Image: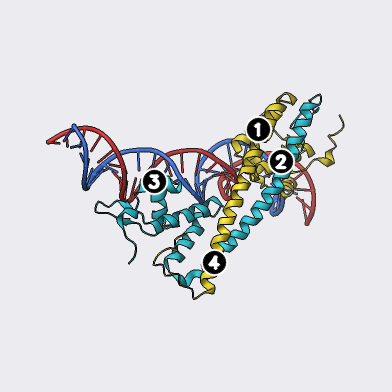
Chain colours: A cyan, B yellow, C red, D blue
Amino acid sequence: MTGTRDEEYLGIREVAASVGLSQDTLRWYEREGLVPRVERDGSRRRRYSPRHVGWLRTLVLLRRTGMPTRDMRRFGRLAADGAATHPERLALLSAHRDRLVARIAALGDDLAALDGKVERYRELIAQGRDCGAPLPDGD
Amino acid sequence: MTGTRDEEYLGIREVAASVGLSQDTLRWYEREGLVPRVERDGSRRRRYSPRHVGWLRTLVLLRRTGMPTRDMRRFGRLAADGAATHPERLALLSAHRDRLVARIAALGDDLAALDGKVERYRELIAQGRDCGAPLPDGD
DNA sequence: ACTTGCGTTGGAGTGCGCTCCAGGACGTAG
DNA sequence: CTACGTCCTGGAGCGCACTCCAACGCAAGT
């Protein structure tokens, strides 16, 4: 095959630094089946191929956008089953995408509300302060 | 004072339904000091004032936007200390606001990346499928 | 030969945010 | 009086995503 040039493979330390997961998390992802079994060198040490690293970056993206590891596992298992699972993977991914869009929109609304509250605090302080509340300041 | 009209007070059931937290969570928030002690009726049952409900809605907003309960507790304790803590509360709130802005931006970037992946899957399927990968499909 | 450093494994522990439960008290309907 | 529904309290338990640890293996450096 084309690849398998040893210098392209990375140790766990480098991968951790490069994808932004801890070594422990990398091992945990593997044990949990989010990542296919990683190749080993003569001393049982993990050697990550560039393809593997790419996959890990995808997982980080999914994780960061709120996908539960349970779904990442499903996604990983599908990927291991080859091209036939493309449609199913697409469905998973695009459902996740849609949820993300909704979440971003919701956060946008929440941001507006938060800005309103910040503004009210600024006013309270700018004016004579003391809103006259004996308890948490209402809304 | 003006308020304290009994019909404006709500039981835990109604408050739960109205703010979107479970009764257990409401009780837990109180025990954890996120909410000041709630008034009780003759049978030790909680009666929430409109002000309290407003405060709970604020907590829900903060929670939904990712504020840890630890910070909500700080915020609550400050609020209990009256108007003198307005500046500190403002600082807390606006720091949270800034983090939220950053998070929304980051999610926007992630959404773009995700859209790229979705698009690639669509192409793979539309074309003859099979991307020729013996493993997770790279990036 | 010995130390140092980096990796390995399986399993236990952690922090967060709830969630559930047992045991009990109250008020109302039948 | 009894039964029922709703709420109370304190405390245990849970799901998630890690994170830490002990005990060990291997290889290079001194």
First along the sequence among labels 2 and 4 = 4
Pinpoint the chain carrying mark 3: A
Q: Earlier in the sequence, mark 4 or mark 3?
A: 3
Q: Amino acid at mark 1?
A: Leu
* Nearer the observer, C10 or B42: C10
Residue at point 65%, 32% (across, down): B92
On-image quarter of the N terminus of chain A: bottom left
Determine whether the residue tagged by mark 2 lies in a helix, strand or loop.
Answer: helix
Mark pair 4, 1: CA separation: 41 Å
Residue bearing the label numbered 2: A114
Q: Which residue is mark 1?
A: B92
Picture quarter containing residue A80? Answer: bottom left
Callouts 4 and 3 in the same chain: yes
Give the numbered dot on residue A23: 3
Residues at marks 2 and 3 on the same chain: yes
- Residue at 44%, 54% (x, y): give it: A56
Q: Which residue is mark 4?
A: A90
Quadrant for the C terminus of chain A, please: top right
